[in-house]
Image (cartoon, helix red, strand yellow):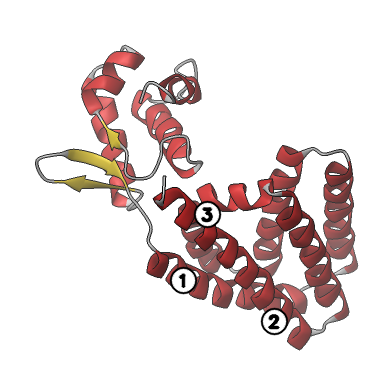
């Protein structure tokens, strides 16, 4: 815990003008889904309260909310731990995500306008520039923005809400996959192909590209999961 606790405390910015339990919830949740707090790690309510110099109540409330999202789980006689994934979990989530992404992109294609196409292409150009400048963090952020943009263009808010929850489950792995140079370069090329399909109205090709894009991402994540399990 001492390896990452300072980073977690740094992520919980108590200076914000928000309710204390909301601040702690936001910070802890981000620390978990970005992998700062590792999978399977116990979250000691008392220790975090003391480290933050707050009572245990807001920490307990924050953990209860995170537990409702199944990002952490309660183990009897042990406490709250960060939920872990196995191979079947990842496969199931990717199967769902593939269906959702294809649905969102299909609807976004139907509603595509010249203005939307320009906005998306501008984002991809900026992402390519960040890649050339070896700005890995910038590439990761703009890649997330590209995925979000497709769901926004689809104008299906309930679908977007479902996808956001799945995205949180896989965020810790997705960021790792885009940190790898070869996978990041390939992913950007795939994003460009998806955009061309959206712009040209090529629905069948788009479905194939999205399916392959997510299949390659899934394979990378499964390899990373295997690597972490062997630690």
Mark toward the start of the polypeptide (2 vs 1)? 1
Measured as percent of width and height from the top left, residue 65 is found at 31, 43
Specify whether 135 is left or right of 33.
Answer: right
Q: Residue at x 82, y 39 (%)?
A: 134
Within-10-Å neighbours for mark 2: few <14, some 14–19, many 20+: many
Q: CA distance from mark 1 to mark 3?
A: 14 Å
Q: Nearer the viewer, residue 106 or 78?
A: 78
Q: Residue at x 56, y 66 (%)?
A: 218
Measured as percent of width and height from the top left, residue 183 is found at 71, 57
Q: Which mark is residue 224?
A: 3
Farthest residue in the left direction? Answer: 77
Q: Residue at x 9, y 40 (%)?
A: 77
Note whether 156 is above or below 27 in the view shown.
Answer: below
Residue that numbered label 1 is attached to: 91
Residue that numbered label 2 is attached to: 207
Measured as percent of width and height from the top left, residue 21 is found at 34, 28
Q: Secondary structure beneath disc 2? A: helix
Within-10-Å neighbours for mark 1: few <14, some 14–19, many 20+: some
Farthest residue in the top direction? Answer: 53
Is any part of residue 107 visible from this angle? no
Mark 3 or 2, which is nearer the eye? 3
Q: CA distance from mark 3 to mark 2?
A: 26 Å
Q: Secondary structure beneath disc 1? A: helix
Specify whether 86 is left or right of 46.
Answer: right
Note whether 218 is above or below 44 in the view shown.
Answer: below
Specify whether 219 is left or right of 202.
Answer: left
Q: Residue at x 24, y 27 (%)?
A: 45
Q: Quadrant of the N terminus?
A: top left
Residue 48 occupies which quadrant of the picture?
A: top left
Farthest residue in the bottom direction? Answer: 204
Is any part of residue 145 visible from this angle? yes
């Amino acid at each position: 815990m001492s390896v990452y606790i300072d980073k977690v405390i740094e992520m919980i910015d108590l200076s914000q003008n928000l309710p204390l339990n909301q601040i702690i919830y936001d910070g802890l949740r981000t620390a978990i889904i970005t992998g700062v707090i590792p999978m399977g790690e116990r979250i000691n309510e008392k220790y975090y309260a003391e480290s933050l110099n707050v009572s245990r109540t807001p920490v307990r409330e924050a953990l209860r909310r995170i537990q409702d999202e199944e990002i952490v789980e309660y183990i009897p006689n042990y406490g709250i731990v960060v939920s872990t994934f196995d191979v079947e979990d990842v496969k199931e989530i990717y199967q769902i995500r593939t269906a959702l992404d294809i649905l969102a992109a299909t609807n976004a294609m139907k509603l595509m306008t010249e203005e939307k196409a320009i906005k998306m292409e501008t984002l991809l150009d900026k992402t390519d520039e960040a890649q050339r400048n070896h700005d890995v963090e910038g590439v990761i952020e703009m890649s997330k923005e590209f995925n979000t943009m497709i769901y926004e263009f689809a104008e299906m808010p309930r679908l977007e809400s479902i996808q956001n929850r799945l995205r949180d489950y896989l965020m810790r792995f997705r960021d790792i996959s885009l940190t790898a140079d070869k996978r990041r370069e390939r992913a950007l090329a795939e994003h460009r192909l998806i955009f061309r399909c959206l712009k040209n109205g090529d629905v069948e090709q788009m479905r194939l590209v999205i399916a392959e894009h997510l299949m390659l991402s899934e394979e990378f994540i499964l390899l990373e999961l295997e690597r972490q399990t062997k630690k």
